[in-house]
Amino acid sequence: MEFLQQRTEIDYESTADGLTSPQLIERARGKRVIISQFTDPLPREVITQLKGLGMIAHVGVGFDNIDLQAATEHGILVSNTPGILNDTTADFAFALLMAAARRVVEADAFVRSGQWKKWSLDMLAGMDIHHRTLGIIGMGRIGQEMARRGRGFSMRVLYNNRTRLSAEKEQELNAAWVSKEQLLREADYVSLHCPLNDATRHLIKEEDFRLMKPTAIFVNTARGPVVDEAALVKALEERWIAGAGLDVFEREPTVHEGLLKCERAVLAPHISSSSVETRTKMTVMAAENALAAVAGTCPPNLLNPAVWDSWAFRPAAAG
């Protein structure tokens, strides 16, 4: 906010509750840019009513809350903040993996509740991570960082992605492309890093969990609706898999009651990119995208660059 206030006039919604769609439409009147978060729904029916808006500068990599096609049709630029949260998100995904495998949350509760009376050989015994197989679904920037962390633990890395990486990149990451089915059958740890869209909604469902090892750990730091959450609960309850580490949920902030009751599920409130440094960089990047457009310079992180050529809000002096 300080960065923006020093450079332009702003209308800041300071409450954590955000705005309803009617409130957002009303507040956007006369504004050039909206800086949004993933909790701000911007579907077609909202975008068509944002008269006079020139840009949506989104804070985050995923932008499934925005109807990009509708924005493009209405000449509204849309940008995101890629790249800067890759390492931080991969760090947290691996933290969830380790916490679930080594039963860290259970151990913490065990000590705090006073149940620890003496040491025993098999007390809260978990599973090793080193030299096991890591399966990554979605091998974009964050997925590749996850692979690098797996390599640091001497893990065998399998991946499935819509587009196969180059041979050089596979060699660098020590990762092998396999079908989704083979990955699920062979991986000891399965980590999701794919975007949410029509093709990936419920990408992982009941039949997929049935393919996994009964000792497998499932990790999701992508988007909740990529997974059929009811099927995941069933997989945990019936012990088709051993555990899960989850930062995202199908109907956030609501979490399936079955997950809340499951001690073998490590749960977090969508904070995988939440380090002070990274969240600061994300917000500043979104602000820089917005200010660039207002100044007549093409924002560097445009999701619909074709709109820029005919953008109606460019200052005349900018050409």
Image: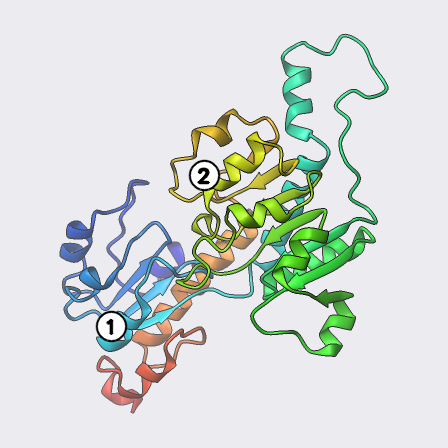
Residue 54 marker: 1
Quarter of the image that includes the C terminus? bottom left
The numbered mark, 1 or 2, whose residue comes first in the sequence reads 1
Which residue type carries mark 2?
Answer: Ala
Q: Amino acid at mark 1?
A: Gly
Q: Quadrant of residue 294?
A: bottom left
Q: CA distance from mark 1 to mark 2?
A: 40 Å
Give the residue furthest to the bottom: 319
**Above or below, comparing residue 51 to residue 261 in the picture:** below
Camera-near label (1 vs 2) is: 2
Q: Is residue 143 above or below residue 94?
A: below
Q: Residue furthest right?
A: 121
Q: Quadrant of the N terminus?
A: bottom left
State the image coordinates of residue 128 (x, y, percent, origin top left): 80, 39
Residue 273, position in %: x, y? 54, 50
Residue 58 appears in the figure: yes
Frontmost residue, 75 versus 295: 75
Name the quadrant containing residue 296.
bottom left
- Closer-to-camera residue (17/196): 196
Q: Residues within 10 Å of mark 1 (few under 14, many from 20)?
A: many
Find numbered disc 2 in the image and state the secondary structure of the residue it sits on: helix
Q: Mark number for residue 291?
A: none
Return the x and y of residue 45 as percentages of the image width and height.
Answer: 18, 61
Q: Is residue 59 above or below residue 94?
A: below
Residue at horizontal 78 percent and vertical 43 percent from the top: 129
